[in-house]
Image (cartoon, rainbow, N blue to C red):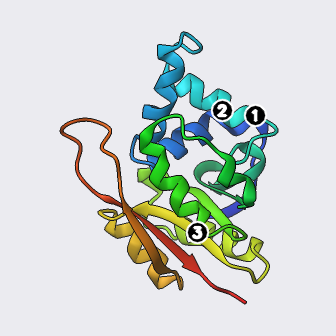
């Protein structure tokens, strides 16, 4: 049997996988953010909150902005992208860790912003991430595409640079914990037009 990769728009039934893949893509940053809902008594677990977040119909970065990659019918990865508009300037960061990310997004208003791109570990090295990235670039219809990654994520940086992205800016990340690995957020963009 030949392995088959297919891409499709996400559906509401995919939200549990979307939450897990967003968390994988962010190396746990997403569950750290979602845990706030647990502390406020709004969810029992961070992943429950992530699933609820992915189910939202009217929020950028939820299921309607997601593309699911399937490998032989199994969900293997996801990309989440949307057009970044002026409204990002009005977002008040709920926590200081979010501020550098918003500051970098302001620099690429008007671009198609790839919020998340993640592939399950057992499906990596099959070209799935590359296919999802190419799909997001195609959705930009010749316009600029941007994304943010961690300075120590060498695998992702190599993929993005090989796909025509170049570093535009970087800012120090606010550590989540006292012993957190120090890094910078790196803004990358690909100018198509």
- One can see residue 78 in this view: yes
SS for callout 1? loop
Q: Nearer the viewer, residue 12 or 145?
A: 145
Where does the N terminus fall, quadrant-wise? bottom right
Q: Residues within 10 Å of mark 1 (few under 14, many from 20)?
A: some
The residue labelled by disc 2 is: 53
SS for callout 2? helix
- Furthest toward the left, the residue is 179
The residue labelled by disc 3 is: 107
In percent of width and height, residue 176 lies at 32, 38
Q: Report the number of discs.
A: 3
What distance separates the C-alpha of mark 2 from that of mark 3?
Answer: 25 Å
Where does the C terminus fall, quadrant-wise? bottom right
Residue at coordinates 70% horizontally, 43% vertically from top-left? 62
What distance separates the C-alpha of mark 1 from that of mark 3?
Answer: 26 Å
SS for callout 3? loop
Q: Quadrant of residue 102?
A: bottom right
> Vertical placement of 53 versus 10: above or below?
above
Residue at coordinates 73% horizontally, 76% vertically from top-left? 138
**In screen coordinates, is 11 left or right of 32?**
right
The reply to whether the C-beta atoms of the residues labelled 2 and 3 are less than 8 Å apart is no
The reply to whether the C-beta atoms of the residues labelled 1 and 2 are less than 8 Å apart is yes
Residue at coordinates 42% horizontally, 33% vertically from top-left? 32
**Which numbered disc, 2 or 3, marks the residue that appears first in the sequence?**
2
Residue at coordinates 60% horizontally, 41% vertically from top-left? 92
**Which numbered disc, 1 or 3, marks the residue that appears first in the sequence?**
1
The residue labelled by disc 1 is: 56
Numbered circle sitting on residue 157: none
> Vertical placement of 158 versus 63: above or below?
below
Q: Residues within 10 Å of mark 2 (few under 14, many from 20)?
A: some
């Amino acid at each position: 049997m030949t392995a088959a990769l297919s891409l499709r728009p996400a559906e509401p039934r995919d939200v549990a996988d979307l939450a897990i893949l967003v968390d994988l893509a962010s190396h746990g940053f997403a569950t750290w953010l979602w845990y706030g809902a647990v502390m406020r008594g709004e969810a029992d677990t961070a992943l429950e909150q992530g699933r609820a977040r992915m189910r939202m119909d009217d929020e950028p970065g939820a299921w309607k902005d997601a593309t699911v990659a399937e490998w032989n019918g199994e969900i293997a990865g996801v990309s989440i992208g949307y057009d970044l508009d002026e409204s990002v300037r009005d977002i008040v960061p709920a926590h200081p860790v979010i501020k550098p990310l918003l500051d970098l997004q302001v620099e690429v208003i008007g671009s198609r912003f790839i919020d998340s791109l993640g592939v399950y570990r057992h499906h990596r090295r099959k070209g799935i991430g590359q296919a999802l990235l190419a799909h997001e670039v195609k959705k930009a219809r010749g316009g600029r595409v941007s994304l943010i990654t961690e300075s120590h994520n060498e695998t992702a940086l190599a993929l993005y640079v090989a796909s025509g992205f170049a570093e535009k800016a970087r800012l120090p990340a606010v550590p989540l914990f006292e012993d957190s690995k120090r890094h910078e957020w790196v803004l990358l963009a690909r100018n198509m037009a």
